Amino acid sequence: MWQSLVQSTEGSDFIVVAVALDRAEAARPWIEAAAPTYPCLIDRDHRVAELYHLVNVPQAVWIDEAGRIVRPPETAGSTDSFRKMDRKTLAVPAEALAERQRVKQVYFAAVQDWAERGAASPHALDAAGVARRLQVPDGKVAEAHAHFKLAQALRRDGREDEARAQFELATRRHPDSWAMWRQGARKDERGIAGGPEFWARVDALGDRPYYPPVEIAALPAPEGGGAAS
């Protein structure tokens, strides 16, 4: 989807920069398989996550040509449809898939509109709008990032047990960060933390979302019918 967005805005000043909050050996195969034409970075120590208060993937931050945040971190076109999946067959109900596709189309249409129209786009927030939505981390989150960085350093030294203890402390202080938790969790052969631990944590959310819905309106259909894409 991001690649198609880049291609649709070719010739403009719009740039997508993707940042993987992961280890290089885990992220690199996925990046190489996608073969994107836009920059892809690997943020092993979650410096971007700390700077912009990112807690999950995919999240996006819109930044204009002056370096001003136009939309603070938000879920980038994903939904909680996966929570309706049959965990034995891995099948997702058709209506859940359709809703996921609808949300993705709405979000990417909004990004494209902003790429083409800039500040004139109805999706570009002013300073007051950004301030209302911006979540500022507290002291516990800062402590969590310190524990996380220590965990990463211990892991690089081969001290996995000590690293895991620091990952647990990071998650305890910043429980909303799935990105932090994922690095300390056990992963499958694909490098994905999607086992029983993950599902237990998802179930513990109850009615709370895994991917908070984004406040963004669908663009009106063009004259002559058809939907925004």
Image (spheres, rainbow, N blue to C red):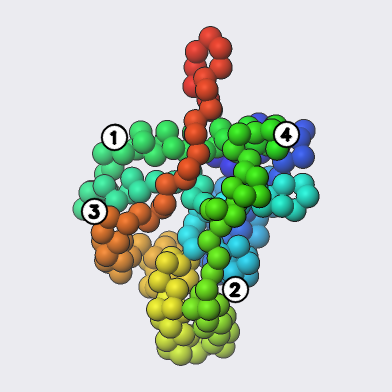
Secondary structure beneath dot 2 equals loop
Find residue 99 and report its image quarter.
Answer: top left
The mark that comes first in sequence, 4 or 1, is 4
Going by the numbered disc 4, the residue's amino acid type is Glu
Q: Residue at x 26, y 47 (%)?
A: 84
Residue 65 at x, y = what percent? 77, 47
- Of the pair 203 and 162, the residue shown nearer to us: 203
- Of the pair 200 and 204, the residue shown nearer to us: 204
Distance in Å between CA atoms under marks 4 and 1: 33 Å
Task: State yes or no: discs 4 and 3 in contact (Cβ < 8 Å).
Answer: no
- Of the pair 62 and 2, the residue shown nearer to us: 62
Above or below, 124 against 67 in this view is: above
Closer to viewer: mark 4 or mark 3: 4
Going by the numbered disc 3, the residue's amino acid type is Arg
Residue matched to label 3: 87
- Of the pair 194 and 79, the residue shown nearer to us: 79
Residue matched to label 2: 45
**Mark linked to residue 94:** 1
Secondary structure beneath dot 3 equals loop
Distance in Å between CA atoms under marks 4 and 2: 32 Å
